[in-house]
Each structure stands twice: as structure tokens, then as C-alpha cells.
Image (tube, rainbow, N blue to C red):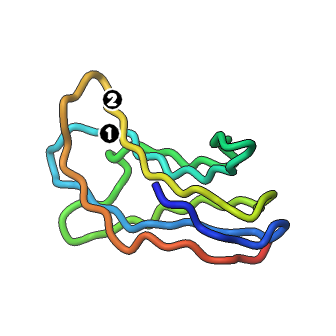
Amino acid sequence: WQDISVVAGKQYSFAIRARRSPGSPPLNLTLSIEAIIDGKPVAIADRQLSTAAIESDDGWSVIQADAVAAYPTLRLLIRTTSIDGADSASIELENARAWQSQP
């Protein structure tokens, strides 16, 4: 995770490029944007999908979440969770970025 300074009331986007190795077990990939309220993270936006829906080999998929900042700090997270008890899967992530966007 990473905390970033933002302007409260503005909309922000968080995106990452992802691709998977063919034949690897699927995982759930989640991009989360959280606000820090009274020192505790509170989810304000999530984008989740199965890695089975992500491009493989030479292709890349872009996954994006958007949220309006209520406080001057946003926390950005990337999580993976197993599907059907799979122990591991191969996924590459690159070019994670956050920016102020239009509503």
C-alpha cells in the first residue's frame, strides 16, 4: 500500500497494468482506494476482477478504480486472493499510477 496526499473534494483515479501467465490458477485482483479516518483505513472504492479475465502473454489489461477524496490523504492498495483454494498464480503488475481525474 501507499499513502498519497490529495485535495479533498477532488476525484482521483488509481490504475495498474496487469497480465497473467497462461495456465496459472485464477486469483482475484483488487485495487482499493481508502480514506484514513481517525487513524483507521476505510474503503471508499474497490475494483475487483478475476485474473482469468486479464490478458496473458504479450497482452496487458488496465484495471482502474476511481474515488472522490473526502480527506487530504488516500491509501492505495493492490490485493490478491485465491479462488478455489489455489496456492499461487503468476501475475505481473506494472505502471501503478494515481492522478486527479474529472468526475
Please state, as top left, top right, bottom left or bottom right, where the C terminus lies in the image. Answer: bottom right
Q: Which mark is residue 83?
A: 2
At 74% from the left and 42% from the top, the residue drawn is 38
Is residue 4 rendered to the left or right of residue 100?
left
Does residue 78 sit above or below 8 in this rendering? above
At 68% from the left and 77% from the top, the residue drawn is 100
In the picture as drawn, the residue positioned furthest to the top comes out as: 85
Q: Element type at marker 2? A: loop
Q: Position of residue 34 (x, y in %)?
A: 63, 50
Does residue 1 sit above or below 79 in this rendering? below
Q: CA distance from mark 2 to mark 1?
A: 5 Å
Q: Position of residue 56 (x, y in %)?
A: 24, 60
Amino acid type, callout 1? Leu
Along the line of sight, the residue nearer the viewer: 36 or 79:
36
In the picture as drawn, the residue positioned furthest to the front comes out as: 39
Q: Are marks 2 and 1 in contact (CB under 8 Å)?
A: yes
Along the line of sight, the residue nearer the viewer: 16 or 9:
9
Numbered label tally: 2
Q: Which residue is mark 1?
A: 27
Along the line of sight, the residue nearer the viewer: 97 or 8:
8
At 68% from the left and 49% from the top, the residue drawn is 36
Q: Element type at marker 1? A: strand
Is residue 33 rendered to the left or right of residue 79?
right
Q: Position of residue 33 (x, y in %)?
A: 61, 53
Near mark 1 (Cα within 10 A), the count class, few <14, some 14-19 or many ≥20, is many
Badge 2 or badge 1: first in the primary sequence: 1
Along the line of sight, the residue nearer the viewer: 71 or 94:
71
Q: Position of residue 61 (x, y in %)?
A: 39, 65
Amino acid type, callout 2? Ile
At 51% from the left and 45% from the top, the residue drawn is 48
